[in-house]
Image: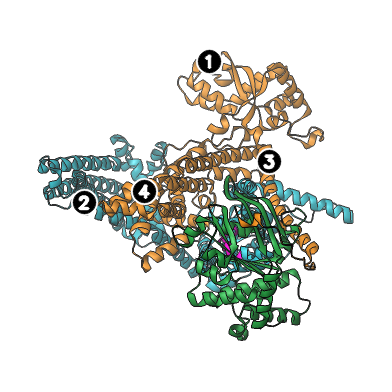
Amino acid sequence: MSISLLLLIIAVIGVAGYLFGSWRANALAGGKLSSLHSRPGYYGSFVAIWSVLPALVVMLVWIIASPIYISSTVRGGFPEEVKATSQAEQNLAYNMIGAISRGLNTLSAEEREAMFADSATARTVLAAKGVPLAADPAPYMLTSADDLNRMTKASGTFLSILVIVAALAGAFVSYRAIAPKFRARNRVEGVMLVSLIAASSIAILTTVGIVASMATEAIHFFNMVPAWEFFFGTTWDPRFAAAGATASSGQFGLIPLLAGTLYIGFVAMLVAVPVGLFAAIYMSEYASRTVRSVAKPLLEVLAGIPTIVYGFFALITVGPFLRDISAQLNGLVTGNYASFIQAQSVLTAGIVMGIMLIPYVSSLSDDIITAVPRALRDGSLGLGATRSETIKRVIMPAALPGIVGALLMTASRAIGETMIVVLAAGVAARMQLNPFEPMTTVTVKIVNQLTGDLEFTSPQTLVAFALGITLFVITLCLNIYALYIVRKYREQYE
Amino acid sequence: MSQVSTSPALGIATKPERRDIGLRRRYAAERRFRLYGMAAIAFGLLFLFLLLFSVVSKGYTAFQQTMITIPIEFSEQIIDKNNERATNPQKLVTANYPVVARNALAKVLGVSEDDRAGLKAVNGMISDSVRVQLRNLVTADPSIIGTTQTVTVLAHGDLDSAFKGQIDLTVPETNRKVSDKQVGWMNQLAESGALSKHFNTGLFTNGASSRPEAAGVGVALIGSLYMMLIVLVLSLPIGVAASIYLEEFAPKNRFTDLIEVNINNLAAVPSIVYGLLGLAVFINFAGFPRSAALVGGLVLTLMTLPTIIIATRAALKAVPPSIRAAALGLGASRMQTVFHHVLPLAMPGILTGTIIGLAHALGETAPLLLIGMVAFVADVPATPMDPATALPVQIYMWANEAERAFVERTSGAIIVLLIFLILMNVGAILLRRRFERRW
Amino acid sequence: MNMMSEAAVEKALDRQMNDISYKMIGKDVSVYYGEKRALYDVNLNVRENTVTALIGPSGCGKSTFLRTLNRMNDTIDGCRVTGRITLDSDDIYDPNIDVVELRARVGMVFQKPNPFPKSIYENVAYGPRIHGLAKAKADMDAIVEQSLQKAGLWNEVKDRLHEGGTGLSGGQQQRLCIARAVAVSPEVILMDEPCSALDPIATAKVEELIHELRANFTIVIVTHSMQQAARVSQRTAMFHLGNLVEENDTDKMFTNPDDQRTQDYIMGRFG
């Protein structure tokens, strides 16, 4: 029985439970609803919850547990010589058994007979059914696959029975519990509260998931490559090892990637901070209502444009433009029309990322600036200060901590930005200071290492997780500190 | 009346000597400062318009495609010389359809069947996608073999570019992809009406293709649609539930503080980190298929949740406490108060936040690259478990293609993406306007 | 210039009584906030070196009128002023009049103490600094000291001039704001309910200060406390629903007002 059918059955039992529960409550009340503790619907919901919830829990546990049990049984049945091989090879064998078992289900009885008689034909037979195998299977694999199929089927049947029984039992028990004085509403609300709490702990789970998953993989990586070589290495040259080679050939130095990340981020901030700040000041202090109502949303459109679009813009428009203009400049000065800015460069990526960050800087600082109490503004204007004097000497100093916080948040965005640098910064991991040359970043390398074939055993793949956790920690620190500053700042004016 | 107006003025105070308070200099500084502000805004807007202009000017032509309508003779000689299609259905699949199309065009253009160079040039005018197109026609109805049908086929990508005027014809012939002869034919066909631009439905229905003229965002649209549905179905209830707990029930203690800080930080975690999470947890650990819309949807859900929670909490906070007090005062439980009174009032704000969160998720690329959605997927995914791509990922893949026609496609896809985003945001704004409440 | 002796103050007051001249003249002043009219053709003259109190129930337009006197209304979106207000003989709404210069001549103290988040010294030095009133550091020191003395705050803060102004008590903060306004040497000081956020002791100190400042400055004060108006002012103007009801000598106003509404208000019948 398929999972979706099973879910449907549970749902039907649940609905039926709801209806019966409500009817029974109504019947008990005998037309006097006030004799009930709760409205009939709550009794219905109570029964429904008890029908559905235990059944779902049973189902979930079974779905997680049974494949693990089956897999260990099948592996336990491997011939001794296979058990002696490495874990990776056993995994490979198990994967093949899985494929064969899928293929077996498509075969007719005669085809099966024939295949079991001669395991050498298995590969061609199964390929014809659309199940490609990497190699000719060993004879034990066919029986294992058969076992696997049998167990899976048995497990499915058992699961169906178990779940339906659980649902019916839950419905029955809870239905019997209904009585006029029974506090159904409190029970139902208790369940609701628990589910609300569960939903809000997803935030925690996500963080735990991020840290745990990345840390595990990163630790695998650090088992292969010493941590200090990663954190203090100045050469990035992962050199994809040929299949089968296990040596951790290649160097995984973080420093050049970090240098590129920070350099590009710095150029971006160089563009975004003055523009964003002045835009925010103009919006909050000068602009008339009409100007603000037009210009502010338009600037915020910049924040709504996906970063891939910025990346494309950098790649197709800004990069070539900078390259051509540098060629023209060079030609005018030296007569040699060679461009000194490359199309993919720190400058290209930095400028475009800076444009992307303008709305972040401006809307964050706009909030901060408007949080400066009007009284300070009036105090300064009342003394005969011009607007700009008020801004420069009173508002900005007062808003400074908040603005620093806002800029830190923006910087963390610049560091974590991916698509612009993937398309516009280049892939060469170099350490140099020329902004006209390409450099690469942590995020670019994460993407590079993880697109294409993945092998969770090779340092070339796992290094991405070490990079990821580095990135995560850096941005997390920036953000926590920024949030702390901004919160302090807001409290000051509340 | 007041006294002042009836009593005569008794004299005006003498004006003290005027002080020099540097007004000229200060007003100059004021003007400069103001100018910086305007320049900053102008700079931002300039780039916004440059960006949009650059995309639209390169991409609007992608919505039209050059096609050639010609009578094609489905010659039995070429398709199935030995008449074995009854016994070998494979024959119709592997037949050399491009030659069928080439010959048909050659006939229209009056190129002799012996002029090999001429035939090659003619062949270069038709898209390779003609193979699939004609094959589908024939396998659907084998009886057309031997007849002549009028068929509209895609022009080759280079010819399409030339017809749209995107190829500089003053460049020496050897340096461009379209020869003078082909241009001549093109003009000839255009004059006779056989070659013309049609609305490019293929852009919206086709999947990935290495031929720009046959490539489309169909698969990507479906993939994105699946993901958006998953994000909506998961993140809206979970986000609302979490916000209700945090805003209405949670006691002020260290645990809820921790959740608070957590959510704020999750909202600022770089999106690529979510990709790593998805790869490690959903694909490597839980064994979900790579490239599947399901995994993409889950990753984007986790990424969108903090945004939705923050928006929902703001919306709940905006409901005045007097509403809660009124409901509680009538004997409603806290749960009833929240679900019957507070939540409906906060709904417009919640939906606005959700739409904006969805719009962000729709444009997100980086995490999808890591979970393998950079795949060459030509077939429309039937379920969220099948390999799919997403609109922004499709844009990324096309952006990496070198051909000129792909730049047009990429820009076209960006226009499609931006239109979706604009629609979503306008929807959010309208929703906010429509239901905005002033307490 | 040091603190004025009691005798000097009295002398100055006598001079006022005998030789009245108007520092500011408001003629047919109306104020609109967008469509809403807040002030109806107010005619009110402000005498030089006199404390003029503006009283009336909340929302009567007294603060609005005060803010027209140094054009602080300009900072409010959609606010429009008609009529004519002169300072000495200059129409302050004349396009040729510079608002910065005007505010340097007509200073303002606000309802809530609003010291800048800077040191005490910098708070007082702020005005002179932006207007370039002190050429050297010594000049600035002198201005700061004098202003703080005039505000009666010098002895309390002279040892901690470089500590933050926000660390002072509410009353001290308000006197710091008065010192800040005084430091620019304005001709008129506008005070918008300067004591409403202060406790009685601090209020008494500020009232005393107002009394002393009168010798050098023309003061217009908005107050919601009639006792305060009676204590600090020589002239009182009563506003009601955007109209000027009556303007008179304070003594007369509180003993024998001309207008029935004034009488009612003073007797506490409304407001």
- For label 1, the residue is B144
Amino acid identity at mark 4: Leu
- For label 4, the residue is B343
Image vertical order of residue A185 relative to residue A372, above or below: above
Amino acid identity at mark 1: Ile
- The answer to whether residue A60 shows anywhere in this view is no
Mark 1 or 4 closer to N-term?
A: 1
- For label 2, the residue is A185
* Nearest to the observer: residue A281 or residue A233: A281
Tell me whether marks 4 and 2 sit on the same chain: no
Tell me whether marks 1 and 4 sit on the same chain: yes
Q: Nearer the viewer, mark 3 or mark 1?
A: 3
* Nearest to the observer: residue A237 or residue B55: B55
Q: What colour do you see for chain C?
A: green
The chain letter for the residue carrying disc 1 is B
Q: Is residue B350 left or right of residue C109?
A: left
Check disc 1 and report its element: helix, strand or loop. helix
Magenta span: predominant SS is helix
Q: What colour do you see for chain A?
A: cyan
**Residue span colored magenta:** A365-376
| Residue at the image point whose x is 41% and y is 55% from the top | B317
- For label 3, the residue is B53
Q: Nearer the viewer, mark 2 or mark 1?
A: 2
